[in-house]
Image: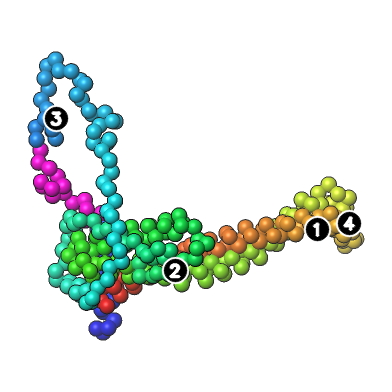
Amino acid sequence: MRRVARPIVGALPMALAVACAGVAVAVPQPGVTQPPAQPGINTPAPAEEGRSELGNFDTPDTLQRLAPEPARPESRPVPEYTTPPPPVVIEELHLPEPVEPVAPIAPPPRTLRVGDFTSPVPDEVPGELLDGVNTTAADVEAAIATQGRSIGINPSRSDKIAAATVGGALAGAAVAGVPAAAVGAVGGGLIGAGVGAGIGFAVGAAGTAGATAILAGAAAVPTAGAAAVPIITGGFVAAWPIAAAATGAGAAIGAGVGAAVGAAALGIPAAAAGAVAGGVLGSGYGATL
């Protein structure tokens, strides 16, 4: 029972931190995040008769709106711990309190880093693409680490939980999403190829004598019955030399479109569910080991 309960209990603090996301750096502190009111500065000054309205900044271009956004914290190298981080003490957890935002972790050069997962990247991969992925993952990891610290988790343990959560989400998305996308791609490709081939044949044969024979045979089915079948077959044979190229192109296009749609239809929901499950398991792993 203890082995089963440890991962569950370990995931509780991070679940609380994520549920209270945004509070860690937004809770006002008198005199710190919320300066004391000063008449004429923070509060409207008493109206003075005959005063010019040039000093009224209550417009879309107020000084507050023109103030620059807070600077993004400087990145830091991958932390190295000589001793295991201290465990999470449930009794010491509390509601989120304002803390200093955790700086995102910068991976080594030409390395993909998503939480605990790292892998060298070939030189053929554009640096802008690699930097974008690493930056997004690092920002998410830093936000989770910040939330962990805000509820009383030791900084080194909070870093470990954040890295394990992000890495687990990636692993879960891959494990669940890739097979589902493959199944969807195969099924969607087969359906799309059939539909595309039919459309291609119709487009290629349109306006030919074969198409005219096919339409005439189809119109004769109610009266001629089986006798109309040779007419329709002859029409297909006559139209096929012209429509063959269009049929092949339609099948190829349909297969590509169908594979993409099928992969997205099955792969994206499966990857999302896998990411959630992997993130929860990773959080428990990072909190207990």
What separation in Å lies between label 3 and label 1 (alpha carbons)?
79 Å
Q: Is residue 214 left or right of residue 117?
A: right
Which is in the foreground here, disc 3 or disc 2?
2
26 magenta-colored:
yes
Q: Secondary structure at mark 1?
A: helix
Q: Residue at x 25, y 38 (%)?
A: 67
Do we see residue 19 in this rendering? no
Looking at the rendering, the stretch of residues picked out in magenta corresponds to 22-37
Which is in the foreground here, disc 2 or disc 1?
2
Residue position for label 2: 120
Residue position for label 3: 44
Considering depth in this image, is 245 or 226 the residue closer to the camera?
245
Quadrant of the rendering where the C terminus is positioned: bottom left
Residue position for label 4: 238
Q: Residue at x 46, y 57 (%)?
A: 127
**For residue 288, which quarter of the picture?**
bottom left
Considering depth in this image, is 215 or 105 the residue closer to the camera?
105
Q: Position of residue 278 (x, y in %)?
A: 38, 70
Lower sequence index among marks 1 and 4? 4
Q: Position of residue 5 (x, y in %)?
A: 26, 79
Question: Badge 4 local density, few (<14 within 10 Å), some, or many (20+)?
Answer: some
Q: Position of residue 58 (x, y in %)?
A: 23, 29
Up the image or down, 286 lies above or below 237; here it is below
Question: Badge 2 local density, few (<14 within 10 Å), some, or many (20+)?
Answer: few
Answer whether labels 1 and 4 touch (C-beta < 8 Å).
no
Q: Amino acid at mark 1?
A: Ala
Do we see residue 57 in this rendering? yes
Q: Main secondary structure of the magenta part?
A: loop
Considering depth in this image, is 36 or 236 the residue closer to the camera?
36
What separation in Å lies between label 3 and label 2 (alpha carbons)?
58 Å
What separation in Å lies between label 2 and label 1 (alpha carbons)?
47 Å
